[in-house]
Image: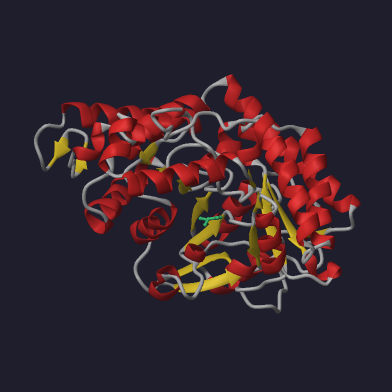
Amino acid sequence: MLSQFEKTDSAVFDIIHQEENRQAAALRMIPSENYVSKAVMLATGSCLTNKYAEGYPGKRYYEGQAFTDQIEDLARQRAMTLFGAEGVNVQVHSGSPANLATYCALAEVGSTIMGLALPHGGHLTHGWKVSFTGKFFNSVQYELDAKTGRLDYDKIADLAKKHKPRILISGASAYPRAIDFTAFQEIAKSVGAYHVCDMAHIAGLVAGKVHMSPVPYADAVTTTTHKTLRGPRGGMILCKKEHEAAINKAVFPGMQGGPHMHTIAAVAVALGEAATPDFEAYAKQVVANAKRLADGLKRFDFDLVSGGTDNHLILMDLRNKGLTGKPLAKALDCAGIVCNYNSVPGDTAGPFNPSGLRLGTPALTTRGMKEQQMDQVAEWINTVADNIDNEAVIAKITDAVLELCAQFPVPELFVQRANQ
Ligand code: DSN
């Protein structure tokens, strides 16, 4: 099949193949990225991509749904069992539409929503002004405490009392600490708001039982499926039974047409994998690795937002080093260490060259790396930061990174050349 692909369209095949080599030969430390299993990859590339299935199981607008209904029911059942949810939508295409659909299901356009500000670790779709969620809704944003770099639940409660949001959003894209979802639930309850949690970053940690689950404490929980959860690029909305019909209606026909059945099949596979003891061990190691990496970076005097991490990610504040995020991210990329520049709380630099660097351990942990390798990575990051314009030093690290990657092969290759 793959050799056929190579013959039919070598241009596309070659680019995918190069990307595959890049993924194998680099330390991928963008905390929202991972490597999926071969089974997830195969489901994503299956014949289900050929099928239209508008509607929901048992109530579709096209015929020929015997197997699509089975796939969607299986994905739904696995999601509800794994996360202990009363209801779920597995059709939503990804995290941003999941958030928008949930807000539309629980509130009207113009209602007040309240989420974590983007420069403080929130996501665009938590009401940031350039996102439609910040335009369609009256968005109020809370921030991290300037001194601790942590959520301040008292301040969030005060802001909620003042603005009386219809929806209080918990969850983040760049917050390295555990989130207390019971506190969010109490705040939401005290002002009559719905509590919507976006657990995209930590879904795998929740499934692996190393982070508190928001599911019992939120009206709805949105997530992507491709981050720590290690599934295909996709989305899900878990919810209380009473909200399921409105959420389903907001997804289809409100925002989407036909569901991507190949993605839903791959989500089902990933959910099956996430329910295993192996996955629990994986989630535990993701956190252990992040903590060890944080300790290593601190030994080199890197300043970490909140002083460390409880989860899979680290946010470095480079201001004490006289560096900004973009040049360091680029130098690290040359060395084969791929992460992303990021704003930090109180950042006065713009979003295109902010003062921070965000990195995480989900993908490295999938390759089998452990604490010892994290010590090595911390040392390399420090050397690159000290030698940002020194090509010779960076080239040496590139070679060392390649050697390490060879010792920890990626789980399964996707596109192998026919002759390999
Ligand atoms: N863009 C994602 C991230 O990298 O965190 C959030 O959806």
Query: Residue 62 lies in what quarter of the image?
Result: top left
Residue 354 in view: yes
Left or right, 252 with respect to 312, comes to: left
Q: Position of residue 211 (x, y in %)?
A: 65, 39
- Residue 126 location (% of width, % of height): 51, 63
| Residue 235 seen in the current view | no
Which of the pair 210/44 is nearer the observer? 44
Q: Position of residue 145 (x, y in %)?
A: 75, 66
Camera-nearest residue between 364 and 117: 364
Q: Quadrant of the N terminus?
A: top left
Q: State the image quarter where residue 106 is shown.
A: bottom left
The percent position of residue 418, horizontal first and vertical second, equals: 38, 29
Q: In the picture shown, does residue 404 fall above or below 389?
A: above
Residue drawn at the location 44% of the way across and 34% of the way down: 414
| Image vertical order of residue 145 relative to residue 398, above or below | below
Considering only vertical position in the picture, is 416 above or below 122? above
Q: Nearer the viewer, residue 230 or 306?
A: 230
Q: Residue at x 29, y 47 (%)?
A: 248
State which quadrant residue 212 falls in.
top right
Q: Please identify the residue farthest to the top as the structure is shown.
A: 277
